[in-house]
Amino acid sequence: MNISFLTMPHVVFGVWGIIVTVWLLVEVLNASEKNLRRMKISSALAAVFNWLAYILGGWWYVKFYALDKAKILKGPFPAAHDIFMETKEHVFFILLILATFLPILVYGNRLWENKSARKLAIVVAVLMIILGFGMEGAGSFITQGLRLGLGGK
Amino acid sequence: MLDKRTVGFGLSAAIVIIFNGLLVIVKETYQPLFKFMAGLTGHHWTTHGIFDILLFLILGFLFSNSNWQNKFDGAKLANYLISSSIIGVLLIIGFRLVEG
């Protein structure tokens, strides 16, 4: 099996992380005692999916990325590594920290009656969604850099 | 009012996000630190993540036991997190653009 396929779970969990964060955002915007359970589930899933994206992507990055990095740097689009990968691998930690903080916020406060906590949850979710899309976008540039490094076919 | 852990870990997150960006610049420009971090776990990035997570947990628990609960509401903490996220991202992207 091509080792590049091993990056797919990382990408999938990253996308699921975005989707459940959007779900959480919708629940918080309509917060009531009735959807408390859904807010808790979606915040916990956002943390779990981002952690899985981190562990699986990190494992692949440390174990296999050096091969792709060499191909990218020899190709016509070295910025795919120099700018996009170098930025992505470190900006991701911001997303991971926010994803870890999110369930602490949701489980620790009565969001439906606490406007202050609700505002904070909305901001954290929006930041996570923006960063999540940033990760996906940077990933596509890295893939393009590798494709060009392999001959552009 | 926010609960103690939300304030503690929210503040911790804001600090660690800035720390994360600064650590990128320092480790990339100071090779002994880069090598030290690479030597600890076999890869500088793995160590970087562990540093971030440990600092987040340590500061989070420390701040949760402080008396700052009344000093921070959701809006203030949200502003801290927005500002730190923007600064954290700019530190990393800016450094990469300058370093090329």
Image (cartoon, coloured by chain):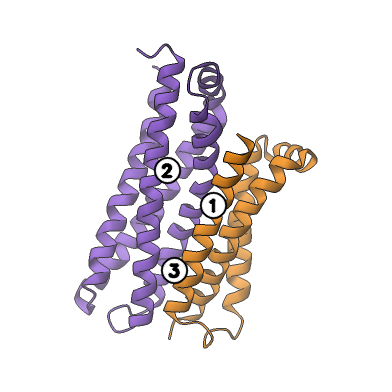
Chain colours: A purple, B orange
Q: Which mark is residue A104?
A: 3
Q: CA distance from mark 3 to mark 1?
A: 26 Å
Which amino acid type corresponds to the residue marked 2 in the rendered image?
Ala
Q: Nearer the viewer, mark 2 or mark 1?
A: 1
Dots 3 and 1 on the same chain:
no
Q: Residues within 10 Å of mark 1 (few under 14, many from 20)?
A: some
Query: Along the polypeptide, which appears first: circle 2 or circle 3?
Result: 2
Q: Nearer the viewer, mark 3 or mark 1?
A: 1
Which amino acid type corresponds to the residue marked 1 in the rendered image?
Leu
Query: What residue did someone put label 2 on?
Result: A53
**Chain under callout 1:** B
Vertical order, B67 against B14 (above or below): below
Quarter of the picture containing the C terminus of chain A is: top left
Do the residues bearing badges 2 and 1 touch, measured as CB atoms within 8 Å? no
Vertical order, A132 against A63 (above or below): below
- Seen at 76% across and 41% down, the residue is B36
Do the residues bearing badges 2 and 3 touch, measured as CB atoms within 8 Å? no
Q: CA distance from mark 2 to mark 1?
A: 23 Å
Dots 2 and 1 on the same chain:
no
Residue lying furthest front in this view?
B98
Circle 3: element type: helix
In the displayed structure image, the side of residue B46 where residue A91 appears, left or right: left
Circle 1: element type: helix
Answer whether residue B40 is visible to the viewer in this image.
no
Counting from the top left corner in percent of width and height, residue A95 is at: 46, 53
Query: What residue did someone put label 1 on?
Result: B90
Which amino acid type corresponds to the residue marked 3 in the rendered image?
Ile
Quarter of the picture containing the N terminus of chain A is: top left
Counting from the top left corner in percent of width and height, residue B29 is at: 73, 41
Give the quarter of the image for residue A56. Answer: top left
